[in-house]
Image: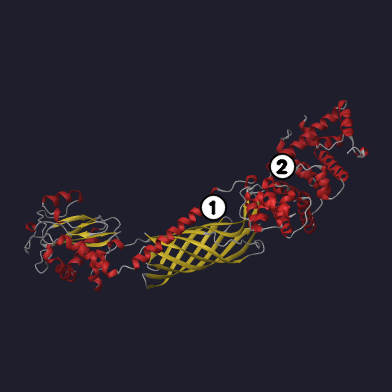
């Protein structure tokens, strides 16, 4: 440094060299000598210090965005960047949660779920369905029949009465319809001597479907007329009829255990009235008039297998083929790092609508702080329409669907159209697999860009 | 060389990449893929900020500077994997970035800004630190390319004149001249505003 030509640099210039730590000994001496008697030069030194401090301070705050680093490492196929993220900006909390979902422990849990489902399905398939229903019939009715009058007649009664009660059921249905508005349902007892039943009550709930409860003329209700529900238990109890009330719970249907002396076969027993609340969710009337009315017993016995209109799907996605555009020509080599969850509501026999949320490996540009940063993490949330093409009975049920998705992403939108096959070994649980076309429309520096890929997807669905 | 590689592998096993020198890390780039990725990760952690600042300050458009920033490391990694002899890592990475920036400017035909058309806007007479930094950024546009790049390397990346000379492959005296002239020019442009601070 001692050999530098000093002729080029004025004392003002030497200030810069000095502050940069690049001034030679001679230059420093020259500068200090000049500074000693030159006030203007001292002010110049202050200015130079201010400029130097301003640039150094600004440099401290300039770091590459995490997404930019992730994008670069993704391009190079390097996944572990933990030791470089300390220099970069924080990732969004949403992406943190998504990363959590992809941790090895979550993959193990998912595997266990799928394994459990397969085992359960296999067990279900090994149990003949007919035997199952027959067992239900015996356990739910026989056990209570042994102890009272009904036991001698009920099985025959059920077979005989159900077809005969068409007119009576129509009458009840009219009552139901007329009482819907008041949320109260009135059932009228009968004294028809032809039938072996004096009273029957039809309960209907959203969850369980229709249960037909039969009593055999045992309710000695002395009170005529419709009764508010609040008074109902006492009325029944006072008339010693409560013991004979059939009991319906989640998984069984049992008849009452009233002693024989309380049963009456008197066909002249007067009409008796009582009221029952109409469940708020009631919206179905089972058509007992139809030729299928003889399956009413099955309806009763299969209450527990009823499913609602809501279902949930969880699936993984494998990227098969990327269709890149000019801007995201650098594509990810990741194939398995995708997740999607979908909630569906059945709007009719063949259609479902719902919402979906997913995260897939797909190169997009995200605008951050007025910058477009390439990332492979596409997150979307949108609407789903699911259309059942056909359904066949084989090892349970196999259903074929079209699946349409339109969703918003961090940048703009995606479209997914897929076709899938779902196997329901059980009414509630199903396994599905399908292929879908994925198209992405993104805003890249003010221009719309199209790109896409094809996916293989698979997962489990649960009907609530 | 094989002995050195064995020693380096010991470091790899204990995940002590940070203890490796630039030369050792560079040597690993052409080896096993996993080693190369780990070595690159460490190199990136050392140089990413400097390269990023250099690109950002050289190309005002954030989108383009990000592209160049990424391309710099992609080219570097590919060159390392291909067994390119890299003696000075710092210089090598900056030369890649510099070439990409020069190519970009050539292809995009950047216009020269005339001093008479240049106006700096200040919010107040009492310039704050952030304002001054912004003014310097704006004023840098008026520097010729050679002066600006030397200034960026020195002022924002705190590279020594010697390191800059190596990176740009020019004598150190040239770098001294470029940096001093750059700062002299900047001070001249900013002098009205610097004066206002003293009022």
Circle on res. B1: none
Name the residue that disc number 1 marks: A99
Going from N to C along the chain, the mark reached first, 2 or 1, is 2
Residue A155 pos. (x, y %): 16, 67
User: In this orientation, which residue lies closer to the viewer: A416 or A118?
Assistant: A118
Seen in the picture, residue A139 relative to B26 is either above or below; the reply is below
Q: Name the subunit of mark 1.
A: A
Instruction: Place residue A35 in its image quadrant.
Output: top right
Image quarter where the N terminus of chain B lies is: bottom right
Q: Are marks 2 and 1 in contact (CB under 8 Å)?
A: no
The secondary element bearing badge 1 is classed as helix
Q: Name the subunit of mark 2.
A: A
Q: CA distance from mark 2 to mark 1?
A: 31 Å
Image quarter where the C terminus of chain B lies is: top right
Label 2 or label 1, whichever lies nearer to me, is 1
Please indicate whether residue B172 sits to the left or right of residue A388 in the image. right
Q: Residues within 10 Å of mark 2 (few under 14, many from 20)?
A: some
Instruction: Place residue A360 in its image quadrant.
Output: bottom right
Residue under the image location 10 percent in, 52 percent down? A239
Name the residue that disc number 2 marks: A59
Residue under the image location 73 percent in, 41 percent down? B134
Q: Residue furthest top?
A: A37
Q: Is residue A25 visible?
A: yes
Residue A90 pos. (x, y %): 60, 46
Q: Total of numbered circles in the picture?
A: 2
Residue A303 pos. (x, y %): 27, 62
């Amino acid at each position: 440094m001692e050999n530098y030509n000093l002729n080029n640099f004025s004392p003002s210039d030497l200030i810069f060299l000095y502050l940069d730590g690049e001034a030679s000994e001679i230059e420093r001496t020259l500068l200090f000598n000049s500074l000693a008697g030159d006030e203007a030069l001292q002010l110049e030194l202050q200015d130079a210090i201010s400029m130097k401090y301003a640039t150094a301070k600004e440099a401290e705050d300039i770091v590459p965005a995490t997404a930019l680093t992730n994008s670069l490492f993704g391009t190079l196929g390097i996944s572990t960047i933990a030791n470089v993220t300390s220099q970069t900006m924080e990732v969004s909390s949403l992406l943190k949660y998504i990363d959590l979902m992809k941790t090895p422990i979550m993959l193990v849990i998912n595997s266990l779920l799928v394994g459990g489902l397969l085992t359960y399905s296999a067990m279900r398939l090994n149990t003949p369905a007919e035997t199952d229903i027959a067992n239900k019939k015996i356990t739910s009715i026989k056990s209570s029949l042994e102890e009272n009058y009904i036991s001698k007649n009920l099985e025959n009664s059920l077979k005989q009465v159900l077809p005969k009660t068409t007119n009576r059921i129509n009458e009840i249905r009219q009552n139901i319809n007329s009482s819907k508005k008041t949320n109260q349902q009135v059932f009228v007892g009968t004294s028809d001597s032809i039938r072996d039943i004096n009273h029957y009550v039809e309960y209907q709930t959203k969850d369980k479907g229709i249960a037909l409860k039969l009593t055999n003329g045992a309710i000695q209700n002395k009170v005529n007329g419709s009764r508010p529900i609040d008074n109902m238990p006492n009325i029944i109890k006072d008339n010693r009829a409560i013991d004979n009330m059939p009991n319906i719970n989640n998984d069984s249907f049992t008849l009452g255990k009233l002693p024989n002396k309380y049963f009456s076969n008197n066909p002249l027993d007067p009409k008796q009235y009582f009221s029952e609340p109409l469940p708020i969710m009631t919206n179905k009337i089972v058509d007992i008039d139809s030729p299928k009315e003889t399956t009413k017993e099955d309806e009763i016995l299969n209450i527990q297998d009823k499913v609602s209109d809501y279902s949930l799907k969880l699936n993984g996605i494998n990227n098969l083929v990327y269709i890149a555009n000019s801007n995201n020509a650098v594509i990810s080599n990741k194939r398995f790092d995708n997740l999607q969850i979908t909630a569906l509501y059945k709007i009719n026999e063949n259609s479902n609508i719902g919402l979906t949320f997913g995260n897939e490996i797909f190169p997009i540009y995200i605008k951050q702080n007025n910058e477009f940063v390439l990332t492979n993490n596409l997150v979307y949330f949108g609407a789903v329409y699911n259309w059942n093409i056909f359904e066949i009975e084989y090892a349970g049920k196999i259903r074929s669907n079209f699946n349409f998705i339109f969703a918003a992403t961090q940048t703009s939108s995606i479209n997914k159209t897929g076709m899938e096959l779902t196997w329901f070994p059980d009414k509630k649980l199903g396994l599905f697999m399908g292929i879908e076309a994925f198209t992405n429309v993104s805003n890249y520096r003010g221009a719309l860009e199209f790109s896409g890929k094809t996916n293989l997807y698979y997962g489990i669905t649960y009907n609530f | 060389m094989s002995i050195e590689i064995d020693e380096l592998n010991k470091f790899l096993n204990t995940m002590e990449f940070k203890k490796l020198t630039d030369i050792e890390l560079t040597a690993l780039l052409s080896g096993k893929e996993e080693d190369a990725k780990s070595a690159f990760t460490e190199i990136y952690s050392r140089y990413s900020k400097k390269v990023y600042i250099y690109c950002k300050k050289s190309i005002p458009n954030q989108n383009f500077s990000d592209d160049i920033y990424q391309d710099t490391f992609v080219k570097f990694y590919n060159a390392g994997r291909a067994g390119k002899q890299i003696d000075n890592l710092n210089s090598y990475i900056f030369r890649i970035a510099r070439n990409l920036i020069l190519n970009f400017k050539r292809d995009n035909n950047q216009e020269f800004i005339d001093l008479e058309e240049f106006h700096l806007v200040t919010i107040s007479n009492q310039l704050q630190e952030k304002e001054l930094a912004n003014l310097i950024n704006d004023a840098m546009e008026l520097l010729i390319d050679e002066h600006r790049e030397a200034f960026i390397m020195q002022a924002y990346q705190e590279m020594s004149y010697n390191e800059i000379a190596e990176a740009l492959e020019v004598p150190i005296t040239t770098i001294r001249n470029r940096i001093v002239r750059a700062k002299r020019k900047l001070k001249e442009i900013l002098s009205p505003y610097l004066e206002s601070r003293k009022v």
